[in-house]
Every structure is written in C-alpha cells, then in structure tokens.
Image (cartoon, grey):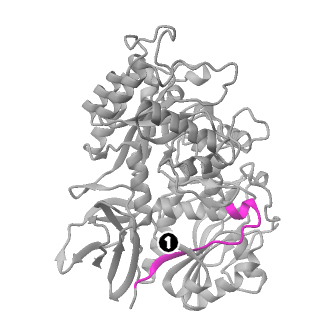
Amino acid sequence: MAGKVPVLLVRPDIASPLDGWSWYGAHQLMEIAGIPFREGGNDQLDEVEIVVIPNLYRPIQVLSLVQAALQSGKVVVAGCDVALALLQSNFDVGAKPVLPIPLPPKEPSELLPLRAYGLLPAAFTETTLPLLGEPLLFASLGLNLGEVRTLDGRQGSLVWVQKVGEGVLVGLGGRIFETCGLLLSRFSWFAHPHRRDSLLHRVDPLWDEQLRPWHRFPVVSFYAHFFAWLLSAVLWERGQILPLRWWLPHQDGTPFKMALTALHDVEIVYDDPIWKRADNPNYCFPQWLDLEERLGLRSAFFFLSPVTALPPHWRINYDIADEPVLAALDLIEERGGEIGLLSIAHASENALAMERERLEDLGGVFVWGVRSYKFGNTPASVRHKSAVGFAYDSSWFAGQSEPSFLTGCAHPFRPLDAERWQVLPLVELSSVLDDRVLFGELTGGQRNGDATHLGIQICETVLALNGVACLSWQQHSFSQRATAFEQIVRHCQQLTANEIWYPAPREIAEWWTMRSEVEILTRSVGKRWWVVEIFPPDDLSDALAFVLAIPSPGKVRVLREGNLLPVKQLGSLGRMPLWGVPLVLEPNESLALSVGVTI
C-alpha cells in the first residue's frame, strides 16, 4: 500500500484577484507551516487525506469535486463562499448563514477596510486576529471552533466541522486565506509610498490605523500555526497524523529555536565624497565584521551599483570602483560575509541585470540577494528579481512609522507574481528590524533607550514562532547604534541558551527552498502506528539537516530499520505537543520511518 501526501490544494481557474489571493494565501499558509501538500484536482483524490479548496468568485466550478472527495471519505476544507454554494445546491454543510448574506467581493478594494476579526478557539490558544473582506457569517449546528466577530456586533463560526458520510467537511467561516494572501502579496503591487494609485498606499493606513492592535504581531505566521493545528487535530480524530517540516534545521541533533542574520545597506561610505578615504568615521566595515565574529553572526552588505539616470535629488556617496569600496568587498568575502545589491532599477529586468553584472564585474564578487533602494516597486518587480537569478529579496521594511511585521510574517515566504498568478522561487526575508525605523529616524523622532527594548520585543515574538529575524543596521551607523545591535543579539542568545542558527541570508533562502521540496508520505500500519516516507529534493547536492515535526497528544516513538531514534519535544502547536525527529537527508536517498504514539 503506497503512502499518501497529506494535503491536496485545489488551484482554481482564477477569474478575479480575490480568487488569486485566496489560493495564494492557502498555498503560503501551508508552505510556511511546513504542511506537505501538492496541487491538483479530481484525478489525485486517491493519493491524499485532505482536500483544501480556497474561496472562489464562482464556486460552482468545484462543487462536484467537493462531493466526490466527501463521498470517498476525505477531509475537505472549504472557504465560506464554497460552503454557501454547497448549501444552495441542497447540500448539508452543518451550518446556516447569518442574514443578510453579502455579495461576494469582486475587486481588491472590497477587502478593505477591516470589518471583522477572528477569535481563535481556546483549544488552540485564545487570541484575536484580523479578517479582511466582507464577512460571510455562518452559525454552526455542531462542532464550532472559534468565532468571527464583526465590528457592528454580529457573530458567526470561525471554523466548524461536519461529518458527511465517511468524509468530514471543515468550513472556514472567516476569510483567513484572503487575509493572508493580501498581506503577503503587498510585494506584488505598486508599492511606492507616494503613488496615489497604489494598493499599498491604501493598505498602509489600515496597518497604521485599523490594524494597530496587531502591529507587532505576525498575523500570517500565527494563522499558519493555527491551520497546521486544525488539520492535525482533525486527522488525529480520524486515526491519522500530520507530519510537518520543522521551520529550521538542526545542529548535531539539536533543532534550532530561531534564526538570526544581519543586513547592512551601504548608502554612505565617506564623510566627504570628494576625499575618498577609508580612514573616516563612516567606513565601518571592519568594525561590523569584528563585532559579528564575536557574536557568531553572519551578515550581508548591500551595495549601490546604478546603471540608469538618477532622480535629480538623489546623491550617491560612492562608486563601486572606488579603491576603498573594492577593499571593503574583499574584506567582507575574506571574513565570510556576503555581498548583495541595493537596487535602483525596479521596473526593468534588463536594468536590474545590468546593476548586478556591474557589481559582480567591477567588484569581483558573486551577488546573492537584493534590496530595493528607496522602496520603489512595480507589480513586475519580484518577477524581475526572480528572473535575474537572485536567491532572496529583503526590501520590505520601509513605509513603517514604528517596528512592525509589515507583511504579518515572522518566517520567509515566496512572493506572488500577481500578473501571471504564480508563486515565484524567489525567497522573501520580510521580518526585518531596521535601525532607522527602530530609532525613529524615518519619522523625525528619537527613541534611543526605547529602541533596544522594542527590538528585543520583536525578536522575542519571532522566537515564540520559531521564525527568522533579520537585523538591518546601516553600514555607517556603527558608532551610534552598534551597542543596541549587540544587546538585542545577546538577549536572544540568553533566551535560547544560544540554540540559534546564524546563517548568511542566502543560506536562509537555500534552506527554505530545500525544506519546501522535501516530500513526505504517510500510511497507517496498525493502531497508532504509521510509516512515514521522506524523499529529499531532486536537486539536493549535499546533506540536509532536516527536522521532522509530529503534532500528537501522546508521546511519539520513531524507529528506523528497527533502531529507536531520538525524539525531542519542540514545544507545542497551540495546546498540542509537537515532537521533533532530527534527521540527515542525503541526495537521492529516501527514508522510511515507523512512527508510533502512546497515550
């Protein structure tokens, strides 16, 4: 009997941006959570345990698939619009709509402003998260998990569960997928803060005003944890488990608790650009490298290398061919650092490629990542960055008046090409703590002592979700702000007993890509015993330190070829214990594990 992929994500024919946002939100929620899934349709129902169907503007196209999945004994997770279409076709969904029933949204603007929030169930962890879009409320007739509460006082079920024959219908009463898809796809729309036609210009006030209670709360990452818990709990009730990919690698069998890296924009090198001297207070490359070596940290420095005409008010402090700059490039690479591009060319793939080529040719370096200078962006910018061959992008800290999770994410994720509705291979490092935002420089304020405390709060939140924090300090700011940088890192080390991964940014991107491509199949072989098969990525060229995570209310035992493997409790997923099995995946070698649970 062959193993099954735990989850099938149904990709619809995208007829509106809302279809795309819902699908993309579901896709990235599962990738962030480490849920093994594949995309497909009717022909793959026999190969999976769960079918996830995002909301659709025309949900009638998936009704036959829902009914076929339920009749074959599957768990079907359906959005509220799909549930309403099922109900209108005389299918018992286990809940009734709360009148009045709103028209389904058709345009992006109809997701705004905030009209409701979700109260997560106490069985997971009781907290509130925002829900964008006009709420379609359902009153559950059976098992109800959490609530949707509108700002005008109405209530409905956040999630309900209904047994349908041998199958189970899980209804999502809140627009969780759309909310996450919108927040993550901020990368995919006109994003210059001064453009009045910009979607981001309309989204930013939401974060500044209506979403202020969640300003420093990674909404998307928390929804990812909740969704993984929900699927795990439903499968456990059916005698199945949901193996997950842990968020981080391990070292010598000890899983890391968070990842920490550093980013340095090189906007200023000289105190006087006329006298191009390394002996000046703004030339801080050696000081940063010395400090990071003492802390065990690795970093990337992002250099300007313009090839196009600049706006009249922009002044570049240095040229990449300057002798002191070339010496800095050599020093960074000698000390194990990384070189990135601080890009000005946002709207043209050719100009972006020329910027990268100029930096690599004149500097004699290889450029792995990119950041957008002055926060310019177009809908095609992320596609250009991906096509040029960058491993990662980490632009998205700008536009903040105070430190916050701008995309709601404490983990890396992959951006959306919203013109072609594709998830790009580029990795976004979005949980960036920027010194200019932290110290109030961009808003003309001064936080000083409060800045370190705020930075520690953000990093503690990332740690609680086992995420990735990027400390972004300007290269020339060493004498003013290195103390706060060191205090934040030292605090994280103390909290984690130094169980922190210190990768270069490209290593985060490579890990996130490899992690997402690990295939996991499961099959039951007895009461509370399963075989879990793990297949490494096809293009894996070196050993991968991978942690298999298993949510289970009972203690987990894992055997490989009859030998008991070490299992560590990683914490919990909501209120469900989460057990981890550190593994080393070798190229072209699959693993078969026997997993048992004792209650």
Q: Closer to the camera, 552 or 422?
A: 422
Q: Can the viewer see residue 362 in this picture?
A: yes
Q: Is residue 424 above or below residue 217?
A: below
Quadrant containing the C terminus is: bottom left
In the image, 38 versus 226, the foreground residue is: 38
Residue 96, quarter of picture = bottom right
Q: Position of residue 457 (x, y in %)?
A: 44, 37
Q: Position of residue 41 (x, y in %)?
A: 61, 80
| x 47%, y 10%: residue | 271
Q: Nearer the viewer, residue 79 or 391?
A: 391
Q: Secondary structure at mark 1?
A: strand
Q: Answer left or right for 71 relative to 467.
A: right
Name the residue that disc number 1 marks.
37
Residue under the point 46% across and 39% down? 458
Local packing at callout 1 (Cα closer than 10 Å; few below 14, some 14-19, many 20+) is many
* Left or right side of 158 for 477: left
Of all residues, the one furthest to the left in this rendering is 563
- State whether residue 351 is above or below residue 514: above
Q: Magenta region: which residues?
A: 3-20
Q: Residue 573 at x, y = what percent?
A: 41, 62
Q: Amino acid at mark 1?
A: Phe
- The answer to whether 317 is drawn above or below residue 58 in the figure is above
- Rendered residue at 66%/63% (across/down): 22
User: Within the magenta stretch, is there residue 7?
Assistant: yes
- For residue 76, what is the image quadrant? bottom right
- The answer to whether residue 399 is visible is no
Q: Nearer the viewer, residue 523 or 391?
A: 391
Percent x, y for residue 504?
A: 37, 42
Where the N terminus falls, by quadrant?
A: bottom left
Q: Is residue 596 magenta?
A: no
